[in-house]
Amino acid sequence: MKQVYVHGLGQTPASWDKVLEALGTASSAVCPHLGKLIQHQEVSYDNLYRAFADFCDGLGEPMDLCGLSLGGVLALNYAAEHPEKIRSLALIAAPYKMPKRLLRLQNAVFRLMPEKAFGPMGLGKWDFIRLCRSMMDLDFTPVLEKISCPTVVICGKKDGANRKVCKELSTKLRNSQFFFVDGAGHEVNTQAPEKLAEILAQFCFWGSLQSVH
């Protein structure tokens, strides 16, 4: 059974290292590099998703899929499109409907940042801006009903921009649970890796997802 961890915008696969170390699955986890998946293509959400979907299709078996932020959006998209391929799903700080004002603000901030700040993910400054612009109209509300696998929705307690939408997402998915992570903001995988690993180990992966009453 594959366990796939998808990083957020501005992160790399290494952003999962401490989580995987805490889980004891560093050697078996699959962590795609989103910047490399979309190399030699125009950077847009549609192209990135197609590259990501091709990557997941190539794994060839049901998987436990975990994504943060942009990685969570991709995971949600794939789970809705291929529900038969997902055993369990973890969505961290992942909006199901894009906050247009926030994306515009994010792009305004990106424009002020130096080019070198965008290097680790393998995309340039204007790639980031084009990617965010291409996501403005995403809304997965109509397809959420297609997702029936056990799902955990997670958000850092300090992530004010995503707390409400993550709670909403959890209520819209038929087989989901919601967790706040104390002491974490948006990048839960780097800010509270041990706490995140505890949630994933208990409620998401290895077919051990249980109901909490």
Image: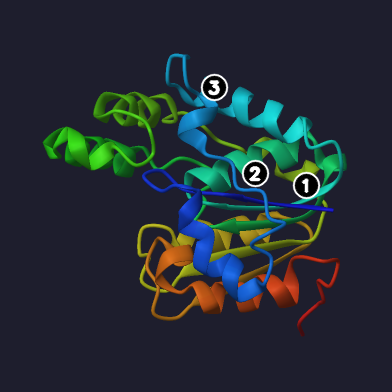
- Identity of the residue drawn at 47% across and 14% down: 41
Q: Position of residue 42 (x, y in %)?
A: 43, 14
Q: In which quarter of the image is residue 99?
A: top left
- The residue tagged 2 is 76
- The residue tagged 3 is 46
Q: In this view, does 71 lie to the left or right of 84?
A: left
Q: Distance between the residues labelled 2 and 1?
A: 9 Å
- The residue tagged 1 is 147
Q: Name the amino acid, label 1.
A: Ile
Q: Is mark 3 on a helix, strand or loop?
A: helix
Q: How far apart are marks 1 and 3 (CA)?
A: 20 Å
Q: Is mark 1 on a helix, strand or loop?
A: loop
N-terminal label among 2 and 1: 2
The answer to whether 118 is drawn above or below residue 148 in the figure is: above
Q: Name the amino acid, label 3.
A: Asp
Q: Is residue 22 visible?
A: yes
**Residues tagged 2 and 1 counted as in contact (Cβ below 8 A):** yes
Q: Residues within 10 Å of mark 2 (few under 14, many from 20)?
A: many
Name the residue nearer the viewer: 139 or 202. 202
Q: Name the amino acid, label 2.
A: Leu
Q: Is mark 2 on a helix, strand or loop?
A: helix
**Residues tagged 1 and 3 counted as in contact (Cβ below 8 A):** no
Q: Residues within 10 Å of mark 1 (few under 14, many from 20)?
A: many
